[in-house]
Image (spheres, rainbow, N blue to C red):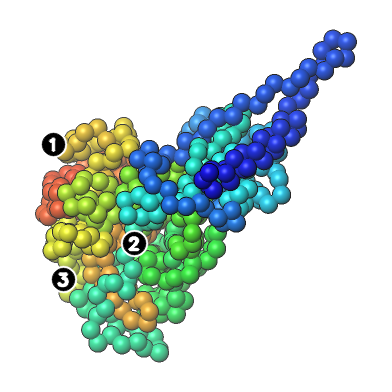
């Protein structure tokens, strides 16, 4: 007899004994006439779909998951949409605390439902943590413990040249618990890790040796923040005294950074804001340059803003997307009282939609909706760096998630040219077809039609309907410079690019705009919808620089919206003026 099957039978036997005890614990005995006790009804269990493709689940099994392997599992609960919509429609009151925790019992699970989960998972070796908004529960235990509780076991699969683990049979929960769940993640690691471009793979500038003292000698062929700010008119908001004071950009990272690099850059750009770091599910073990890039882009363009860095270890075993969602949940936790602050979130991570499990997508989608609708933040997500082919297969049209999520503002990339005074002289789609057989995050600006999400009603405007449209969510929404940006990493200056830079550039611009709006009209804007409202209601103004040259190796740039750059790059002063008119 197969050893794995024998072990599974023993696990199921133990599970049934455990469930019998649970049944006696959870189901009250009802008394009948004459004091006779009625036997409790049997608990109905239901299988949980983790959203792993059937083809992957049917791939060859290569061996069992060790019983001692720790699993970090996240349960995403259904939310009360009426409450979420009410929070979204509440009048923004800048400067006033939001006290969202007062709505938590109505938005998320009730005390009684949470108690049922604690009863079900409340055995030795399991720890639980409920989010402040009561919409997410994290559970930590060994694989054998989860196997016993969920009536399953875990095995490794070989699929398309990679290894992943998953339950051998669908995990089961009592129906009265399953009915309150949107998704469970962390019971598998089917989802591929986020695509990212380490700065060390970019071009290190010749002759830029490491300097023990302050080094502000970035190569003149790269774009420094002052040039980007002038080209995109961020400096016009600076001239009004808006540098990001009391505003915050939250960064979602899966790698770390070197403090000496950041301090050198801060000195060069005269950054006077406050940067904080929160490690979620463990601190990073590598510094590849992504976090460095994001921090420096924000600091250079909003030099007095708060930068809140949420970091996790992208090298740990398990489902990295569960950890990314934990970072989003931590941002939600930390800002339950700050929904009136006009903050932004920047995410420079993504993977092809088909390479992420349905459970991971559903969990992150809900976190993004809460960040937007309840906490009034604008979430910017890089559209990806493999052009129109995010799955890294040339001519295989695909887009990146979470950039494709309707609650994110998807940001594409351009090549920006400026003159000696920093004036914008030219701008084209960022793309490179020199190596069509291998995308190392250098093919260019991600964009295309989602295979998962329908086009939201607010996604409209000139040329949004075009010959490539098919009723799906279309990305990107907007773009920014994604080529030859000056970044200080590992003690030297580098020329870096990618939509990973474009997302924090827009996030910095958003908080400058919101700072101005709060100051002048005592309101601010948020959500992806605002970018379409601006595009469609700005007569006599130019809120975007329309990019009409180039392509992303499939979709051409065009007048108005296009699949390579969205509406274009920021002309931030007019963008601010347009929103100011509409909010008055």
The residue that appears at 47% across and 76% down in the rendered structure is 259
The label nearer to you, 3 versus 2, is 2
Q: Residues within 10 Å of mark 2 (few under 14, many from 20)?
A: many
In the foreground, 148 or 82: 148
Q: Residue at x 33, y 37 (%)?
A: 453
Name the one closer to the observer, 194 or 63: 63
Q: Position of residue 20 (x, y in %)?
A: 71, 32
Q: Are marks 1 and 2 in contact (CB under 8 Å)?
A: no
What whole-number distance in Å separates the C-alpha atoms at marks 1 and 2? 31 Å
Q: Is residue 376 left or right of residue 435?
A: right
> Which numbered disc, 1 or 2, marks the residue closer to the eye?
2
First in sequence, mark 1 or 3: give its number: 3
Q: Position of residue 494 (x, y in %)?
A: 29, 76
Question: Circle 2 sits in a helix, a strand or a loop, which is it?
Answer: loop
**Residue at image mark 2:** 196
Report, in whole angstroms, how far the alpha carbon at label 3 lies from the one at label 2: 31 Å
Label at residue 484: none
- Of pointers 1 and 2, the one earlier in the residue sequence: 2
Q: Is residue 383 left or right of residue 345?
A: left
Q: Residues within 10 Å of mark 3 (few under 14, many from 20)?
A: few
Asked if residue 332 can be seen in this view, the reply is no
| Element on which disc 1 rests | loop
Which residue is the site of mark 3?
A: 419
Q: Looking at the picture, how far across and down is residue 547, in whole percent?
A: 16, 53
Image location (x, y in percent) of residue 241: 39, 63
Which residue lies under the disc numbered 1? 467
């Amino acid at each position: 007899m197969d050893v794995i099957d024998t072990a599974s039978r023993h696990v199921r036997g133990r599970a049934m004994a455990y469930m019998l005890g649970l049944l006696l614990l959870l189901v009250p005995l009802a008394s009948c006439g004459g004091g006779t006790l009625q036997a409790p009804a049997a608990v109905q269990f239901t299988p949980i779909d983790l959203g792993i493709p059937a083809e992957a689940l049917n791939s060859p099994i290569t061996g069992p998951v060790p019983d001692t392997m720790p699993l970090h599992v996240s349960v995403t609960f259904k939310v009360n949409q009426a409450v979420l919509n009410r929070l979204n429609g509440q009048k923004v009151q800048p400067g006033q605390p939001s006290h969202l925790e007062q709505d938590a019992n109505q938005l998320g699970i009730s005390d009684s439902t949470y108690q049922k989960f604690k009863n079900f998972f409340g055995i030795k070796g399991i720890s639980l943590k409920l989010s402040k908004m009561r919409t997410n529960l994290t559970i930590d235990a060994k694989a054998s413990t989860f196997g016993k509780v969920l009536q399953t076991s875990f095995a490794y699969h070989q699929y398309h040249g990679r290894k992943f683990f998953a339950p051998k049979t669908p995990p089961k929960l009592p129906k009265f618990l399953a009915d309150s769940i949107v998704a469970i993640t962390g019971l598998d690691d089917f989802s591929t890790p986020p695509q990212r471009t380490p700065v060390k793979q970019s071009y290190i500038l010749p002759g830029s040796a490491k300097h023990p003292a302050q080094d502000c000698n970035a190569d003149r062929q790269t774009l420094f923040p002052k040039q980007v700010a002038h080209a995109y008119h961020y400096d016009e908001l600076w001239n009004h005294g808006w540098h990001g004071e009391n505003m915050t950009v939250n960064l979602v990272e899966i790698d770390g950074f070197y403090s000496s690099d950041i301090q050198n850059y801060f000195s060069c750009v005269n950054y006077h804001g406050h940067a904080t770091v929160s490690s979620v599910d463990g601190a990073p073990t590598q510094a590849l340059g992504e976090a460095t890039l994001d921090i420096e882009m924000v600091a250079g363009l909003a030099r007095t803003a708060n930068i809140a860095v949420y970091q996790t270890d992208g090298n740990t075993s398990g489902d990295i997307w569960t950890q990314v969602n934990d970072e989003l949940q931590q941002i939600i936790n930390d800002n339950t009282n700050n929904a009136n602050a006009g903050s932004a979130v920047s995410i420079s991570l993504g993977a092809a939609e088909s390479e992420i499990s349905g459970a991971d997508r559903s969990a992150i989608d809900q976190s993004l909706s809460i960040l937007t609708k309840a906490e009034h933040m604008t979430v910017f997500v890089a559209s990806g760096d493999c052009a129109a082919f995010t799955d890294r297969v040339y001519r295989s049209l695909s887009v990146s998630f979470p950039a494709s999520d309707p609650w994110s503002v998807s940001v594409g990339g351009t090549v920006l040219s400026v003159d000696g005074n920093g004036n914008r002289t030219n701008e084209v789609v960022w793309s490179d077809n020199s190596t069509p057989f291998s995308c190392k995050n250098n093919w260019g600006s991600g964009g295309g039609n989602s295979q998962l999400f329908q086009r939201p009603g607010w996604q409209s405007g000139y040329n949004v309907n075009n010959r490539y449209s098919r009723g799906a969510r279309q990305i990107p929404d907007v773009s920014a410079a994604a080529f030859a940006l000056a970044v200080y990493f590992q003690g030297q200056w580098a020329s870096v690019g990618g939509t990973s830079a474009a997302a924090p550039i827009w996030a910095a611009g958003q908080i400058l705009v919101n700072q101005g709006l709060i100051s002048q009209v005592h309101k601010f804007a948020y959500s992806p919808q605002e970018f379409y409202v601006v595009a469609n209601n700005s007569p006599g103004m130019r809120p975007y620089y329309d990019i009409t040259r180039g392509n992303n190796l499939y979709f051409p740039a065009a007048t108005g919206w296009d699949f390579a750059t969205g509406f274009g790059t920021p002309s931030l002063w007019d963008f601010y003026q347009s929103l100011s008119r509409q909010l008055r």
